Amino acid sequence: MKKLFFIAFLLVSSLGFSQEDAWVYFTDKPETQFYFDNPLEMLSQRALDRRANQNIAVDSKDVPLHQPYIDTVASANGIVVKAKSKWFNALHVRGSIADIQSLSNLPFVDHIQFADRSLNNTNKSAAAKKKVLQKVNKNLEVTTSYAYGNSGNQIQMLNAHLLHQNNFTGAGKIIAVLDAGFPNVNTAVPFQRLQSNNLILGGYNFVDDNTNFYSRGSHGTMVLSAMGGYVPNQLVGTAPDAQYYLFITEDIASENPVEESYWVEAAELADSLGVDVITTSLGYFQYDDPSYSYTYEDMNGTTSFVSKGAEVAFSKGMVCVASAGNSGAGPNPYIGVPADAQNVLTVGAVKPNRTYASFSSIGPSFDGRIKPDVMAQGESAVVSNLSGSIITANGTSFSCPILAGAIASFWQAVPWATNVQIIDFVKQSADAFSNPTYNYGYGIPDFQLALDTALSVSNNSKPQFLVYPNPANDVLFVSFPNHLNQATIDFYNTLGQLVFQTQVEEATSSISLKKLNPGIYFYKIQSNSFSQSGKILKN
């Protein structure tokens, strides 16, 4: 009997995984020129303004997929279209291996990538791909207890209360929350202020493909409260006057790569709506079907579909903030995706006394980058639960939105700044900036210091030169306006000694830092009409 049960279980399991997931990439977008000539047909004016303010050009990634291509794939035998991505000109499909492979015969299909990468043409062994690691909980292992305090500590730790005192509360900035659901946000008391002031702009449920975003898992409700919640003397979010879009991308009933595609689809919509900050308290490492799972070697910022999508989102001028994860005390302590992406601001968790919370996932990324980037309170964080009661909860799920809301309030204070500069100012203000670790990243940001630094750099006007990334590894980029055709950049050590000098003669120039030892350096960029100074950290 036991043997029969085991055989039956194997059969059921086999049937459960008989359908494969894959991305089908198209060759072109035939209507590209039409959309270039009519950009408001694909992007809102606010999205175009955000790009113009950061000198970001519209490109083919912004153009929607060609609908006849979608229709043809959707009508193919055995194929179900689960999600679509204009950024990657691709569809996420589900079907048998044979039915998916047959799509390669369509003249407009460029290539197909299976979520089970052992089915693709690679030299990497299937065994390595199927290595079983600790599973990331769907809600990032949230635990709760009754609260008896208020939210002051988690805000004051960041000096975000000083932003609020100067009326920088996120007004005019839009945050997209990508999560598992937002039930009762339309009725619970902590969100009444958002509703009364029309600060919830809308949303979408990508899992169920409908507009009912006040549904599904309560995790997103708790996350939103850390930014937009408001109950006097109990809970004040870090961006109480920001506007919000609420997107459901996480299916709490299963763990499947389609959730990565939902995430990218939501990020694309957020971009087109003019969103400034994306916050996501989700992370992926192992899937229900082990053949889809990642290994630590994949945590390089370039392997997963969602991390590549987060990088595109950054390239469009948005700031992407992601939780590090809660596996720090487990057998697989490392960050998941999209926290591994280079330009995602990955947030770990600290205790109320500013010390590292042992559950917070650690770095480095597999390619050696500092992760997490920064820290915020994630142990005993004050949030609202589903019923509107104010509770405490543990998880990087909450340190992430606490930090994201503070970023929106900070960006309101320096509206001239690019997303690159916002991230740099935040990192540079952190308490371990000059001595980062793989547990603590660059530390806890000080948003008053970030504001002081930003205003000092700008001299109350928009800086002419953009220097990024900061911190840097071996390559630094310098961009400057088209009306300047050359400049000199000098690097000084902390003793004020000139250690390196070079010329930049293109709109965007790359500078090799391989000759510099790790440490802090001060730079001065000088052109015929303008000079700018600052500091960088060489890792």
Image (tube, rainbow, N blue to C red):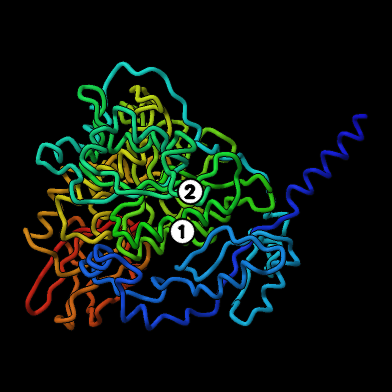
Q: Can you tell which mark lies on residue 249?
A: 2
* x and y, in percent, of residue 7 in the image: 88, 40
| Amino acid bearing label 1 | Glu
User: Please, is residue 54 above or below residue 138 in the view?
Assistant: below
Q: Earlier in the sequence, mark 2 or mark 1?
A: 2
Q: Is residue 19 left or right of residue 304?
A: right
Q: Is residue 209 left or right of residue 378?
A: right
Res 330 seen here: yes
Q: Is residue 77 left or right of residue 235?
A: right
* x and y, in percent, of residue 157 in the image: 24, 33
Q: Are marks 2 and 1 in contact (CB under 8 Å)?
A: yes
Using the rendered view, name the quadrant where residue 125 is placed.
Answer: bottom right
Q: Residue at x 35, y 28 (%)?
A: 384
The residue that mark 1 highlights is 265
Using the rendered view, name the quadrant where residue 385 is placed.
Answer: top left
Q: Can you tell which mark lies on residue 312?
A: none
Most foreground residue, 333 or 291: 291
Most foreground residue, 435 or 479: 479
Q: Secondary structure at mark 2?
A: loop
Q: CA distance from mark 2 to mark 1?
A: 9 Å
| Amino acid bearing label 2 | Thr
Q: Secondary structure at mark 1?
A: helix
